Image (tube, helix red, strand yellow):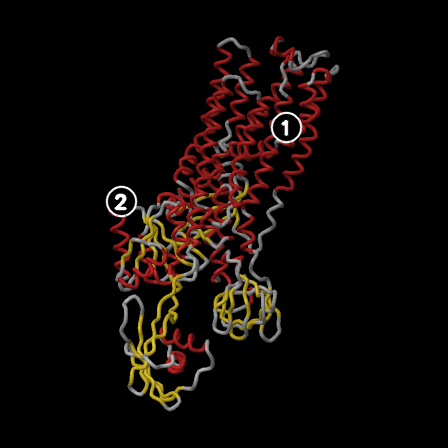
Amino acid sequence: MTRQIELEIGGMTCAACANRIEKKLNRIDGVTATVNYATEKARATVPAGLSAADLIAVVEKTGYTAAEPAAEPEPEATPADPLRTRLLISAALTVPVVLLAMVPAWQFDYWQWLSLTLAAPVVVYGGWPFHRSAFVNLRHGAATMDTLVSLGTLAAFLWSLWALFLGDAGMPGMTHPFELRAGSDGDAIYLEAAAGVTTFLLAGRYAEARAKRRAGDALRSLLELGARTVTLQDGREIPIEQLKAGDLFLVRPGEKVATDGVVADGASALDQSLITGESVPVEVTTGDTVTGGTVNAGGRLVVRATRVGADTQLAQMARLVEEAQDGKAAVQRLADRISGVFVPVVITLSLATLGFWLGTGRGATAAFTAAVAVLIIACPCALGLATPTALLVGTGRGAQLGILIRGVEALESTRRIDTILLDKTGTVTTGVMTLEQVAPEPGEDPAALLRLAGAVEAASEHPLGRAIARAAAEHGPLPEVEDFRATAGVGVRGRVEGAEVEVARGTGDTARTWVEVRVDGTVRGRLALTDAVRPSSATAIARLRRLGLTPVLVTGDAQPVAERVAAEVGITEVVSGVLPAGKVDVVKNLQAEGRSVAMVGDGVNDAAALAQADLGVAMGAGTDVAIEASDLTLMRDDLTAAVDAVRLARRTMHIIRGNLFWAFAYNVAALPLAAAGLLNPMIAGAAMALSSVFVVANSLRLRRFGPAA
């Protein structure tokens, strides 16, 4: 028996930190864990007998902090506030240090000592987060990105102290940087590099923290949709946590529906845009289901709670989004492995660079400059941010549009899909039978025929009967039925206004369902019923084709019915008369042909096929088992949502791959330049900070993703 444990991790500063914690947790017998640097969370599947405290102890022994998530999380802006203060102080002290070093006309006698006075607090106070992290990791025999930063800035600062106190750099009249190019190594100071690198990295980390917060805005807004209090039917107002399934509560105009339930009394229109992404309000009345978090845009409702707390649809949506954000693409797992060995390799490369330039006779100044630049430029931070930030933004934006992405594996599958199987009933069609045609016998009144049939069927629970009664009621009130009788598989009969009326299965073209209406034993006419095609289905099919997907209609209905629906929406491949197990076989057969198959469905009979497909897509109004078996869940009962899901998944994967490419390219291009002595350490620090900010900013572009026009 296993269970899930989630922990909030503190003290991580780069992907190498997350990778190290993940390795430690996965070494525990029976534990499978992932650690997300962007969300600062760990999610672990643990066997019976292991508790959260056991995992927390392992994390703390690794040098980081861990805790179970609080019931009411603190605002995420708090961690950035101390960083902002540290950055502002460091920037104010660094600017004059850089200007004095770079503008010889402003250099006065003993200016270098003023630079030391200003730079020292920056290196010590401003760089403290880097130094502390490096020290903590060193105690545990590990090296991270902070190790590189701390080594680089302290090396530059300590070299400058040696040059000032023991060399010639403290003498009056020393100018910088011109005399150090021609002068002795004892003239070289790197105070502007030490302070500048520290400030640039603080700025990058602050920008990264703010951008990561923006990346998680969509999920936070989703979690905040739920009501905090609820008014019971008797007028008492209680915290939402005290509401129980079966309780009756009020929803006044303008209020949120507190939890999932069924309307017990009243009628209104609900704005479901925050849950489904659909902007048109939905009319509800007695007996209709409602979802917690939707907004009452009309009249007063009394709702009976059916699901509360973690069981609600809103909570399940948030849980799916959070779980999806913890996933890792295959290419990201490669990046993690590289990050795990990157820091020791870079330190070795830095020492080799120092030795090489000393050996070639270029002097200690040139050798030291190149070695420090290698340390500073090589941060693997951007690699660690590439996937999680894009996932954070993409899955959050999907939730806002009514698209739930189960994980990064779904994104990778979506990119490969070339065939999409569409269940007919409830997916391409509405799943609700409607009256399409009234065909009376010669001389019979069609309105009177429908009125009699509707009166009898009003007492029936059969879907066909409800469709007939619904259509008849649109033309006026129906008469009472007496002596009602229903025969399974045959039809219904009863006495209406003194006449014996029978509605039973009839014959006609097989593309529709026909029933006969008999009055006193004589056939008076026939009624044709059909499952209406969704208005948006034809447009959605055309858009799926433009995405390079081949649509295939698969249904348990007879071939004439299936072909009529397929022709109406523009599908040329049809598989009909298929049982639930047969749908699985259809998927397997297409996969055997070399196709990569997506399956879109909504019912229990679709669950097995959804699980077998390379990508399972469940319509949100479908059954829980279908949603559980799927990779993508569409909260809108609209096939165009499937188009948006494919577009969003592909776009997110494109951003992830772009992030990883530029992160790799940055290190591949920058390291040789630094080792060749062509990069000033301060410029290297700025470039390294900007690489992380670029990756996060690139991911934030997904916030602008919108539905297909």
The reply to whether discs 1 and 2 touch (Cβ–Cβ < 8 Å) is no
Distance from Cα at disc 1 to Cα at disc 2: 59 Å
**From this viewpoint, is residue 265 visible?**
yes
Of the pair 108 and 531, the residue shown nearer to us: 531
The secondary element bearing badge 1 is classed as helix
Q: Residue 428 has which mark?
A: none
What's the amino acid at mark 1? Val
**Mark 1 Cα within 10 Å, few/some/many (few <14, many 20+)?**
many
Would you say residue 52 is visible in this rendering? Answer: no
Work out whether 637 lies above or below 54: below
The spot of residue 525 in percent (x, y) is 32, 79
- Position of residue 65 measured from the top left corner of the image (x, y, whole percent): 53, 43
State which quarter of the image contains the N terminus. bottom left
Q: Indicate the amino acid at tag 2.
A: Gly
- Residue beneath label 1, please? 123
Left or right position of 586 against 236: left
Q: Is residue 71 above or below residue 391?
A: below
Quarter-of-image position of residue 89:
top right
Q: Judge from the rendering whether residue 149 lies leftward or rightward of residue 28; answer left or right.
A: right
Q: Is residue 474 left or right of residue 125?
A: left
Give the residue at the far bottom of this rendering.
498
Image: 23 above or below 490: above
Considering every residue shown, the one lying at the far front of the view is 443
For the residues carrying marks 1 and 2, which lies nearer the camera in this image? 2
Front in this rendered view, residue 2 or 367: 367
The image position of residue 509, as x and y in percent, is 28, 68
Residue 594 circle label? 2
Extreme residue toward the right, this view? 109
Left or right, residue 331 beside residue 286: left
Q: Position of residue 593 (x, y in %)?
A: 25, 46
